[in-house]
Each structure stands twice: as structure tokens, then as C-alpha cells.
Image (tube, helix red, strand yellow):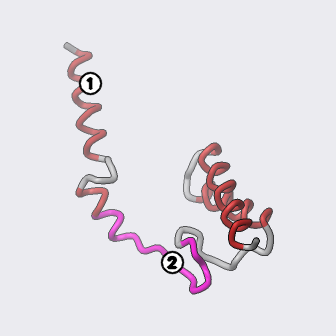
Amino acid sequence: MKKIILSAVFALSAVAFLPASSKAQDAMKSQSIPTTENSTNRAMAGPEPTNALAAWAAGYQYGMSHGWGHEDSLYWAKVQMKLWIIKHT
């Protein structure tokens, strides 16, 4: 019985905090993302990195400063570096 109740509570809390839920959508609408005119990536506002390593560092710093885990920040940094290379070749 305890297992069923815990499963139900977990399922309901997961549904309540999904990005598609109305609470999450209201929270997303209330946040404004700053952008720059030259930036193609809205999530990372600021000056354009001058090389691929700077793009990687900016991506990693962005992830870590927004409370992402180490693995997620490394992934985001790699994506930012690849995007910089594609844009500048």
C-alpha cells in the first residue's frame, strides 16, 4: 500500500512539473531572455566569443552559473564550440 501511494505521489508531482504543464508555461512566460543583435543563440547573451575555446568556456560557464550539473554544462559547452566552428568556417 505504501509503495502504491508513493508511486502515485511521484507520478502526480512529475506531471505537475513537466515543461508542458500550465505552471511551468506561466513561469517560462514570466522569464525574459536577454538577447543581443549579433547573437544567434538567445540563451547565451553577451559578446561573441573570439575563438572556439572561448565559445566552449562561455558555454560551460553559462551552464554552471544556471545551476546545471557538470555533465550538462560540458555538453552545452561542446555544442557552443561546434556552433562557433560551423558559423566561422
Q: Give the labeled residue for mark 1.
A: 7
Q: Amino acid at mark 2?
A: Pro
In the displayed structure, would residue 51 be above or below residue 78? below
Residue at the spot x=27%, y=39% of the render?
13
Q: Give the labeled residue for mark 2.
A: 34
Left/right placement of residue 31 relative to residue 76 reads left
Any magenta on residue 39? yes
Q: Work out which residue is located at the far top of the displayed protein and give it.
A: 1
Q: Nearer the viewer, residue 25 or 5?
A: 25
Q: Which residues are magenta?
A: 26-41
Please state the total of marks drawn on the protein image. 2
Disc on res. 21: none
Q: Are marks 2 and 1 in contact (CB under 8 Å)?
A: no
Residue at the spot x=56%, y=58% of the render?
66
Label 2: how many Cα within 10 Å (few below 14, some 14–19, many 20+): few
Q: Quadrant of residue 88?
A: bottom right
Q: Amino acid at mark 1?
A: Ser
Could you tell which of marks 2 and 1 lies nearer the N-terminus?
A: 1
